[in-house]
Image: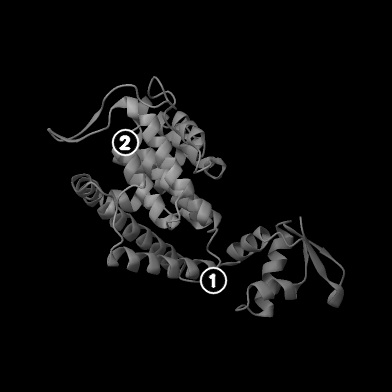
Amino acid sequence: MKPPYKITSFILSKVSSISEKLGEVNANYLSKPSPQLRKQNRIRTIHASLSIEGNTLTQEQVTALLDNKRVLGPKKDIQEVLNAIKVYDQLSSFDPYSRESFLLAHQILMGGLIETPGRFRNQSVGIVHGKEIAHVAPPAVNVPFLMKDLFGYLKDDEDLILIKSCVFHYEMEFIHPFLDGNGRMGRLWQTIILSKANPVFEFLPLETLIIQTQADYYKALAISDKAGESTAFIEYMLKLIEDSLIELLDYNNKVLNDTDRIEYFISLNKGEFTRKDYMNVFKDISSATASRDIKKGVDMMIFEKTGDKRLTKYLIK
């Protein structure tokens, strides 16, 4: 069965806005942000996603662990961060449409933290907020079938991937397939679904915006639970995705530095090229800027120069 939800005017406006901003991202060569921004956003993502679950480590401590440095802190919190680093380092290797890949991600994410990582729960669970039971999850015996249906929807339905990623996130939280780690898996898997559609999503710190609007996050889940459909949660997440794209575009201020341009050019796998080829990719830079970029690439031993004057060509090493 297709999970229930409605397409509202708000959802349509957000889908349109997100599509426009993705066009801006591509036009500004930001689909693969600079290494520095990627690392910064990865740190923010890991820190925020685990903070939502009660992890006490700071961004500085997460950075230190990412750089393979020793950190003093609760053993469980350190293990959570190390596991998350390992999962996010392998993000592109996970298949968003595979239950087996989904279970493998949970196994890595929760390894050393629970007794049965990578396995669906075999007992009943409820979600408690404060002193109240906010949600009673479906019986454990139903979990494998519910998750099979959910992955079937994700793979075969013709809905936009933006919407399907939100629906999957909500429905997975509703099913609560694991004894622990459901929240971080829901957020992780939506990122994986979206990043297969556009690589920029791999580096957008959606979790940072979630923790900044945490009350709204749980409110959207609660409203959707009460309504028996994911409409409110879809609206919340699409607004969040829009905001994260705005942040990316604002951060870069639509101006690439030489390192950003060189890295983007390398990603095109052009092999041998001339300065004119370089300028055909970055149409708004001068010939002098192109020459400086290429010289920097040669100095960094990224490009190899052959020939002289008009016959000069470069090879990506």
Picture quadrant of residue 256: bottom right
Q: Is residue 254 left or right of residue 164?
A: right
Q: In what quadrant of the picture does the C terminus appear?
A: bottom right
Image vertical order of residue 114 relative to residue 241, above or below? above
| Residue at 30% over, 22% down | 123
Q: Secondary structure at mark 2?
A: helix
| Residue at 37% over, 58% down | 241
Residue 27: numbered disc? 1
Between 196 and 227, the one lying in front of the other is 227
| Residue at 43% over, 64% down | 251
Q: Residue furthest front?
A: 1
Between 12 and 23, the one lying in front of the other is 12
Q: How many marks?
A: 2
Q: Is residue 124 left or right of residue 193?
A: left
The residue where tag 2 is placed is 175
Image vertical order of residue 150 relative to residue 79, above or below? below
Q: Amino acid at mark 1?
A: Ala
Q: Amino acid at mark 2?
A: Ile
Name the N-terminal-most of marks 2 and 1.
1
| Residue at 41% over, 21% down | 116
Mark 2 surroundings: few (<14), some (14-19) or many (≥20) residues within 10 A: many
